[in-house]
Amino acid sequence: MVGMPKMATARECREHYRDNLLVGFNALADLYYAYWGEFFHLAIFEPGSDPADLADAYEKTHERYLGALGGITTRRILDVACGGGALSAWLAARTAGEVVGVDQSDSQLAHASRWIAGGQRPNLRFVQHDAMRLSDLAEPPFDAAVCLDAACYLPDRELALRGLAARLRPGARLLLVDWCRAERLRRLQRELILEPLCRYWAIPDLETASGYRRSFEAAGFRILEIDDLSEQVLPNWDRGYQAALRAIAEPVRLGQLLRLAARTVPYGTMAIQAAKDQFQVALLAKAAGESGVLRYLSILAERT
Ligand SMILES: C[S@@+](CC[C@H](N)C(=O)[O-])C[C@H]1O[C@@H](n2cnc3c(N)ncnc32)[C@H](O)[C@@H]1O
């Protein structure tokens, strides 16, 4: 339609992934933390658990993830694309080992710095670095790495996995949890749900389980387990949807946050548009999750 803002193609998303990241995660940090919460990944709800008890679901989700990484005796853990650092802080509080959170976004790292203020967690550090270039990260080998809800933003996941493999000692575990898509989609599922979701989200595409299997193996990992957690995370999509409705019902507060987003980085109207796009993402993600188009996969692997 004439006059509508142009949306990025998959190729443009790949080429400009750093700009997208900065608009999305620098400018919108306050919006996300106001409407979503500290953990920027999905909570797993075990069958029979109370969908309203989010804190309990997150606690169990994190216990499960720490167990997959090797448990409380794991020495050095890398949290790739750690965002506001809440999971890094959770891990650091439960292990005697060292936890290093890495993210590219200044605003996310500013948020993360609250967890280490006043030297409260001497075994926790945050480092600004691009997850696409982890082979350059000046750190001794890690015993485990985790990457939650972030790989979907990366323009070349196999390349990122190769860089990550270079930071891990042989035998180290990697737990990657990501927003993926079903292996086979009908044309209308792509056209009506997946493609608009990716466009509003400014990400090139979503991975499949078989695509990840190939990339992990090519990057030097042996897959131990792939879990499809889609059914167990369904209540999260409703939570995002309700948060979007709440934002629309509070236009004054939302307007303040949008203005704040536009001021925090030199992106102006782009930041405002990105913030508005989050509303569409919340609506589409619920449809994508409930229709089975969107899959939430957990991949546990070992560095060979
Ligand atoms: C949805 S958040 C997830 C944050 C965190 N893992 C969590 O679960 O709470 C995605 C994060 O990925 C980060 N990110 C995206 N692309 C990145 C890149 N190329 N390098 C480093 N961080 C990146 C963003 O800045 C953002 O903090």
Image (cartoon, rainbow, N blue to C red):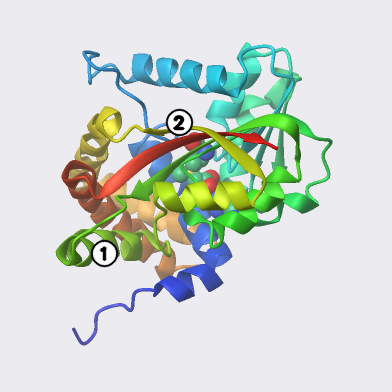
Q: CA distance from mark 2 to mark 1?
A: 27 Å
Mark 1 highlights which residue?
Answer: 196
Q: Residue at x 28, y 65 (%)?
A: 195
Give the label on residue 221, or none: none
Q: Is residue 178 above or below residue 71?
A: below
Give residue 237's quadrant in the image: top left
Q: In the picture provided, is 40 more to the left or to the right than 56?
A: right
Secondary structure of the residue carrying tag 2 is loop
Give residue 265's quadrant in the image: bottom right
Residue 242 position in % (x across, y down): 20, 38
Mark 2 highlights which residue?
Answer: 38
Q: Residue at x 53, y 62 (%)?
A: 155
Marks 2,1: beta carbons within 8 A: no
| Quadrant, the C terminus | top right
Q: From where the camera sits, is residue 129 visible?
A: no
Q: How many marks?
A: 2
| Quadrant, the N terminus | bottom left
Q: Residue at x 29, y 31 (%)?
A: 233
The response on whether ligand 1 sits within 8 Å of label 2 is yes
Rate crowding at label 1 as few (under 14), some (14 to 19) or many (20 or more) other CA atoms within 10 Å: some
Q: Residue at x 53, y 57 (%)?
A: 154
Q: In the picture provided, is 269 more to the left or to the right than 157?
A: left
Residue 192 position in % (x across, y down): 17, 63
